[in-house]
Image (tube, helix red, strand yellow):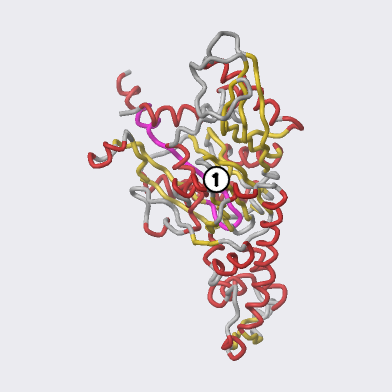
Amino acid sequence: MDHQRGHNAKRQSLVGVLDVGTSKVCCMIAKAMPVPDYMAETGQKTQLRVIGFGHQRSQGIKSGMIVHMDAAEKAIRAAVDQAERMAGVIIDDVILSISCGRLKSDIFSASVGIATESVQHHDVGKVMAAARDYAARDDRMVLHTMATGYRLDDDSLISDPHGMLAERLSVDVHAVAVDSSPIKNLMLCVERCHLSVVGLVSAPYAAGLSAISEEEAKLGVTCIELGSGTTSFSVFADGHFAYCDAIAMGGNHITLDLARCLSAPIEEAERIKTLHGCAFAASSDEGEIISYPVVGELEAPQYNQISKAQVVQLVQERIEEILQMTRERLDAAGLGDTAGKHIVLTGGASQLAGLSDYAARIFSKAVRLGRPKHLPGLPEHGVGPAFTTPTGILQYAMRDTGEFNPHAQTRMLGTGTGYFSRVGQWIRESF
C-alpha cells in the first residue's frame, strides 16, 4: 500500500504538455522541484524542471485541426514516446494547446446580489459561474474565464473583493471560447494515444506567457505567434490576459506560395524560404540567381532558375497579408491603448529575416523577437521561438491564474480520469 501511494505521488508530480501544430507535434514532460536557496526569497516554493522533450513532424493536421485521425495519432504517439524515453517515465495525462476552432475572446460584465453583508468565496464563485454560462452560449466550448477586475455596488475597480462590504458584486470578465467540434476531435485523437486530456490552454495565451515579461504585461503588449498553419495573437494589459484571436494562415502558406509559383517540390520551396526568404529586398537580390528542381521530374530532374528578388517579392506579399489581417482584427476589437506600444513576435515563422522591421512598419510600433522564458532542463534546441507555446503551457501550470474552472466543467471526454485544476493546485501546495 505504501509503495502504491509513493508511486502515485511520483506520477502526480509530473506535468505533461502537448502542442499539436501544422508543422510539428511537441511534447514536454516536467517535474515539480523545490526552488534553489537563492530563489527562496522570492516567495516561490516550487519550479518545474523539464525532464522529457520530444517533437516530430506533423501528419494529418492542418491549421491545428485533425484532418486525418490515424496519421495525427501516429505523430502524437511518436512525440510523446520520444519525451517519455528521455524522461525515463510514462505519463498518463497532458495539458493540450488549442489554436483552432475559431478561437475568440469575449469581454463582458456580470453581477450578483450579496447574500450576507460581506463578499464571501461563494459569492465570487456564483458570479463567475454566471459569466462562464454566458460565455458558453451558442454551443461554444469555454477555455478560459478570467476576472480582470471587480466592482462593489458599481464603484471603481478593485482586485480582490473578499471580505469587503457591499450589496452587489460585479466582475469584468475576459472569456475565451471555441467551436466544440474540432476541439473534441483533437482531444479524441490524443486520448486514442492512451492519454487523458486534463486541461486546455489557448495557444496565444500560452505563447504570451512564455515570450513576454511581467513588466511588458503591466504596461500593455501584443504578442503575435506566427506558426506554420496559424497566426495567433494575444494582448496583455495591466498584468492581465485581455484579448486573443487567431487566423488560419501562417508560415506554411509562404512555402505553398513558392511551391505553386515556382512549380517546385514543397520540400524545395521550404528550403528556398529558409535560406533565401526575406521580408525586405536588397539591391543585390536581382543578381543573385537560385536554381531549383521542377516538380514531377524524377528520373532526369529539370532545373529552373529564379532571382532572389522574385523570391522576396512572393514572400513579402504573403507576409503583408498575414500582418495586415492581424492588424485589422486588432483594430476591429477596439483595444486602442490596451494593445500597448510595442509588439513581440514569436513562433517558428517569426525567424524569417527582416520580419521584425517589416512588422514595425505595418503596425507603426516597436517590434522585438520573443523567445521562450528559461526553464531548467530544457534542451538547447528547445529554446527557439518555435517552442514558445509548449513552454508557455508549463508557465501556465505554475501560475495562480485566478480562472474559474469548476471540476464538473473541466472534465474532458471521459476516457481519462484527471482534472487540470489538481495539477496547478498540487504544484502550488507541494514542498
Q: Is residue 348 visible?
A: yes
Residue 274 point in image, percent of width and height? 54, 72
- Is residue 31 shown in magenta? no
Q: Position of residue 25 (x, y in %)?
A: 54, 52
Element class at badge 1: strand
- The residue at 66%/25% (across/down) is 110
Furthest residue toward bottom: 287
Furthest residue toward left: 37
Circle 1 crowding by C-alpha within 10 Å: few under 14, some 14–19, many from 20: many
Q: Look at the image and tell me whether residue 303 can be seen.
A: no
Residue farthest to the right, as pictured: 138
Q: Quadrant of residue 148?
A: top right
* Camera-nearest residue between 140 and 135: 135
Q: Which residues are magenta?
A: 8-25
**What residue lies at 44% left-to-right and 42% top-to-bottom?**
395
17 drawn magenta? yes
The residue that disc 1 covers is: 236
In the image, residue 117 sits, relative to residue 382, either above or below, namely above
* Residue 190: percent from left, percent from top: 57, 40
Between 315 and 111, the one lying in front of the other is 111
The quadrant of the image that shows the N terminus is top left
Query: In this rendering, is residue 232 above or below 147?
Result: below
In the rendered image, which quarter contains the C terminus? top left
Q: Looking at the picture, how far across and down is residue 127, in whole percent?
A: 62, 21
At label 1, which amino acid type do we have? Answer: Phe
Furthest residue to the top? 116
